[in-house]
Amino acid sequence: MRNFLTPIVYCGYINNKYMKKLIAGLISGLVVMTVSAGEIDASKLPPASDKKDVTFEKDIKPIFEKSCFKCHGPDSPKPKGKLKLDTVASIIKGGENAPDVVPGKSEKSPLVAAISHVGDEDDFMPPPKNKAGIKPLTKEEVGLVRAWIDQGAK
Ligand code: HEC
């Protein structure tokens, strides 16, 4: 009887030990993910502009051209974060951590948190203290980007 039970007890021990490790790993993984993916605190974002019919070509492209194209422009063979910001299609496609823009939901769009300098400092855009000396967007510019996304990012 004892010989019969030993392997089962042994298996139980292994399982227990590895299950504990596995569960601990999963839990810490989840904690890290929730902290880094971090919900955007919408109350900290500049308000969306109330401008109607905001379009990429007319309203947004000039802002991105001035503040983002240096690193995410049409001529970048290797755009930063694998994100090109020169066409609606490439913005919707997103970069390494796509989606960056969620049409209709500016408060859930990581790009908006990045340009608002809300959330993880590593994600702030343009990167603070960039060598090109590109300044952060104004609240009005962020507001326009939000309105554009809220209106469907067309
Ligand atoms: C001086 C260079 C530079 C400028 C200017 C710049 N970025 Fe970035 N951007 C980066 C780098 C570098 C990364 C990659 C960050 C990383 O991997 O940690 C990045 C990543 C991103 C990402 C994340 C992409 C992804 O899916 O992982 C977004 C969104 C973004 N930038 C938006 C913008 C916007 C909007 C502007 C203009 C307002 C801008 N960036 C201006 C350098 C720049």
Image (cartoon, rainbow, N blue to C red):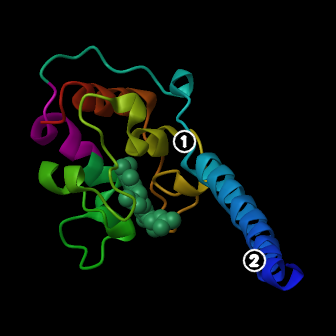
Q: Please tell me whether residue 95 is drawn above or below residue 50 in the rendered image.
A: below
Q: Amino acid at mark 1?
A: His
How far from the left and from the top, in percent, is residue 116?
Answer: 49, 37
Looking at the figure, which quarter contains the C terminus?
top left
Residue 58 part of the magenta segment: yes
Tell me what residue is drawn at x 81 percent, y 77 percent: 5
Q: Please tell me whether residue 135 is drawn above or below residue 48 in the rendered image.
A: below
Residue at which label 2 appears: 11
Label number found at residue 33: none
Label 1, residues with CA under 10 Å away: few <14, some 14-19, many ≥20: many
Label number found at residue 117: 1
Q: Nearer the viewer, residue 17 or 53?
A: 17
Q: Kindly state the secondary structure of the residue where label 1 is placed.
A: loop
Q: Quadrant of ligand 1?
A: bottom left
Most extreme residue toward the front is 1
Residue 13 part of the magenta segment: no
